[in-house]
Amino acid sequence: MPQWMQDIGGALHEPLAWSYFRHFFVKYGIAESLQYLVIVTTVWLVLHVVFRKRLAHRLIAEWPRRGDMPREIAYAAAALAIYAAGASAMLGLVGAGRIEVYSDPLAHGVVWLLASLPLLLLWQDFFLYVAHRLLHTRWLFRHVHAVHHRSRQPSPWSAYAVHPIEAVVNGSVLLTWLMFVPLHQDVLGLYLLHQVVRNAHGHSAIESLPAGFNRHAIGRWFTTSTHHHMHHESPGGNYGLWFTWWDRFFGTEHPDYMDRFDGLTTPRATSSLHARNTSIQG
Ligand SMILES: [Zn+2]
Ligand SMILES: [Zn+2]
């Protein structure tokens, strides 16, 4: 039996290890849940309550059903518990010297400190693009990923509404990364913050980015709320999480994505003029 399996087996029979696990499970569970609640509630309040009327013309399809919220929050609570359990278990691996989460910013140099977050996001995006494609195979979709797709008109509350198995897949991004490279604790914090903010924004049902973002030299490579909303509407494309390049490279970007984004972000006066000109020409 490999050494790491013996270590885990030993830890499972160690009461002190379980007491540490419980302590950090509660600590991380509360911290992650608070972060989730603050960010998701803020995005929802700003876009769906305070500016509801002003942003109505940016509504991608229909307003999400309030009835979806209890189910979405229940699945999010389960996902957050799994992430907290994963973080607590990872701490055991840090203690055992199997993976490294460091606190001295200069321990691995400034270059690594600055490069590690973008590289980790690239890894997460690629890992979850592949995982997402697999989750759309017949058996996995029916038994796992369908939970997330029950929200046909997603809202920020849909962000973490995933089957527990999908939560394990999401959590394994970090473990697979830490198995090979070290990570500064604040970079880890930013990674988790980015995850909640981008997920809540991507499920916001409102296109809040400026016109032309989808065609800008840099902006075109980032996914938008429209991009992911279209995935919920018709799950056969737009699998990308943070970036659009894997969908473009593998030919899975929805063919109507660019037009849909343009239509939502173009000022109404211009679009009605365009419609009138089109009908005159037609
Ligand atoms: Zn989604
Ligand atoms: Zn999907």
Image (cartoon, rainbow, N blue to C red):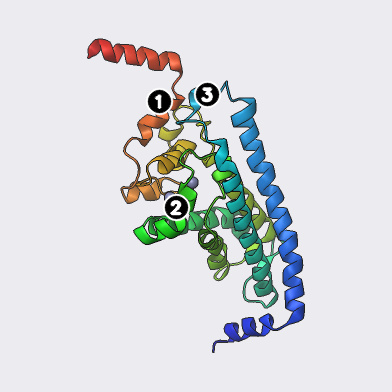
Image quarter where the C terminus lies is top left
Disc 1 to disc 2, C-alpha distance: 29 Å
Disc 3 to disc 1, C-alpha distance: 13 Å
Q: 31 above or below 201?
A: below
Front-most of 147 and 253? 147
In the image, farthest residue toward the front: 67
Q: Which residue is mark 2?
A: 146
Q: Give the residue displayed 56% in from the left and 71% down from the top.
A: 179
Image quarter where the N terminus lies is bottom right
Q: 239 above or below 102?
A: above
Is 267 left, or right, of 259 in this rendering?
Answer: right
Task: Locate residue 21, reporting x and y percent.
Answer: 72, 70
Rendering quarter of residue 38: top right
Whichever of callouts 1 and 2 sits on the residue coming sooner in the sequence is 2
Rendering quarter of residue 269: top left
Q: Which residue is mark 3?
A: 56
Whichever of callouts 3 and 1 sits on the residue coming sooner in the sequence is 3
Q: Amino acid at mark 1?
A: Gly
